Image (spheres, coloured by chain):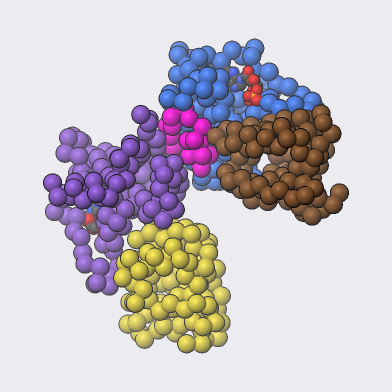
Chain colours: A purple, B yellow, C blue, D brown
């Protein structure tokens, strides 16, 4: 069993570089190649940027905790905040064919992770669970469920 | 992120180095919108030393492109690193941005 | 006031790269130049290596928590473990003139930080406090106390 | 860390890339001690692409140097990056290690 890596940063954009560096190394230590590790880093960065923008409404004095769990079958990233609850109906996934600023973050998160879910058990704030299966077949099965 | 601006007679080159993220993109936006305000005819963004770009960086470029098109200005990109190009492809922006291999090619086109 | 950056890793040497990356960025965000930030990164790495070797006796299933606090006057790094207590009399600082393997770590830690102390209030395990003053004068005064 | 070994008629070049730390130095130690065991006459360690070295990496080099001196072998270093050189200077090992600008210089000395 592997213990997780956990990192807590203040909710200020200047600390996102620390999370990115940790995400890249955590993914590499878990055995991902450079492109996959870069995708994971990018996705975690976008998710943390969204916490600052939407959960904390740009209040940069709060906290974001990011946990990296490496198991045999999956690489899981958990992002927690104590900000306002994400309303699922607000999370719009727009078509990439429209050319306009904004609305790309979710696409990058979904590119790197097979499963992107908010943990309903979390009472206050949000707990976003990002899972990437190491085995492609398992990812497909999970999506069919 | 570091930004260097070089004004030439026909065009302005904006060279960006480092990481473009939620922290640094506001500075990039200020730089580009200042050129838009002056109705700069041609802006060439040199991405050679960009190590990372997130969606806020892409949004900044899309905004600048749209604002320049509105007054028939030309917004061009040069020396896009592979990883950044991958992000543009994924975002379906590779066809929207005008991308050149070198600053010279961008200037002469 | 700045909130700290906190990072927890399993006590396995493969995770030291994550702490180094975080230490370098934390130091840079605090305003240190490249050489100083590299020295800080190196010192934190040596201190965490010592936790694995001496506090945990190479048991790599434990935890190390590293906290980076940036204040106006100082940059402080706190390293906590739940391993066996460090005996101060065991921490020998050897002369650099002898050419032999080992015994360099403490020198690199002292190179980067003005104050290196174990917090006596910590009941179980160790809490190492590393402080680098941003103002050289203050560092001298502190050393004279 | 990555290690590449190139055996020449008179000497062996060990090229190291990346970070030498408590995690990677055991592998470096294995590589060097295997050469010591064979009583290699001359070992040139190429440090050009070393991005980081900690005290365990230095200890590994000191151990290899001492073991080679014991049988009159030659342990040389080439292309030491500035940051690594700083660490050697601080450790007072810049006078102890035989350091050369290039692998050629190290081989011909
Ligand atoms: N953590 C979050 N909490 C609440 N709403 C969110 C969160 N993340 C994303 N959203 C919503 O989903 C939309 C799409 O997000 P995203 O694709 O990252 O694009 P952008 O942030 O550029 O709008 C956002 O505009 C926002 O309304
Ligand atoms: N965290 C620690 N807990 C207990 N003892 C320690 C700790 N750090 C250092 N020491 C002691 O101090 C000595 C010197 O440490 P160091 O300079 O890092 O060199 P090395 O680890 O190569 O011996 C060690 O040999 C060890 O006995």
Does residue A120 appear to the left or right of B25 in the view shown? Answer: left
Note whether B7 is above or below A58 in the view shown.
Answer: below
Is C9 one of the magenta-colored residues?
Answer: yes
Note whether D76 is above or below C82 in the view shown.
Answer: below
Does residue D55 appear to the left or right of C2 in the view shown? Answer: right
Q: Position of residue B51 (x, y in %)?
A: 48, 59
Q: Position of residue C134 (x, y in %)?
A: 60, 38
Note whether B24 is above or below D26 in the view shown.
Answer: below
Disc count in the image?
Answer: 0
Residue at image position (31%, 67%) is B91
Q: Judge whether residue A63 can be spotted in this image.
A: no
Q: Position of residue D37 (x, y in %)?
A: 71, 32
Residue at image position (30%, 41%) is A74
Which residue is situated farthest in the right direction here? D109
Is C134 one of the magenta-colored residues?
Answer: no
Does residue C111 appear to the left or right of C50 in the view shown? Answer: right
Q: What residue range appears in magenta?
A: C3-21
Residue at image position (53%, 78%) is B103
Quadrant of residue A104 within the rendered picture: bottom left
Q: Judge whether residue B49 can be spotted in this image.
A: yes
């Amino acid at each position: 069993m592997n213990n997780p890596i956990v990192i807590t940063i203040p909710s200020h954009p200047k600390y996102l570089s620390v999370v990115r560096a940790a995400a890249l190394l955590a993914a590499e230590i878990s055995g991902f190649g450079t492109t996959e590790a870069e995708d994971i880093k990018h996705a975690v960065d976008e998710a943390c940027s969204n916490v600052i923008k939407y959960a904390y409404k740009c209040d940069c004095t709060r906290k974001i905790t990011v946990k990296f769990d490496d198991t045999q079958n999956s690489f899981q990233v958990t992002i927690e905040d104590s900000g306002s609850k994400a309303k699922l109906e607000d999370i719009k996934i727009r078509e990439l064919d429209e050319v306009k600023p904004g609305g790309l973050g979710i696409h990058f998160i979904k590119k790197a992770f097979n499963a992107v879910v908010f943990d309903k058990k979390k009472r206050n704030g949000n707990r976003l669970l990002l899972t990437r299966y190491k085995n492609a077949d398992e990812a497909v099965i999970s999506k069919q469920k | 992120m570091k930004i260097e601006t070089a004004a030439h007679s026909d065009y302005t080159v904006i060279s960006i180095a480092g990481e473009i993220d939620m922290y640094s993109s506001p500075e990039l936006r200020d730089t580009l919108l200042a050129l838009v305000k002056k109705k700069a005819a041609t802006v060439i963004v040199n991405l050679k030393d960009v190590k990372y770009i997130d969606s806020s960086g892409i949004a900044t470029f899309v905004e600048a492109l749209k604002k320049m098109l509105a007054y028939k200005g030309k917004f061009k990109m040069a020396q896009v690193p592979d990883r950044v190009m991958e992000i543009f492809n994924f975002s379906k922006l590779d066809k929207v941005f005008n991308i050149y291999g070198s600053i010279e090619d961008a200037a002469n086109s």
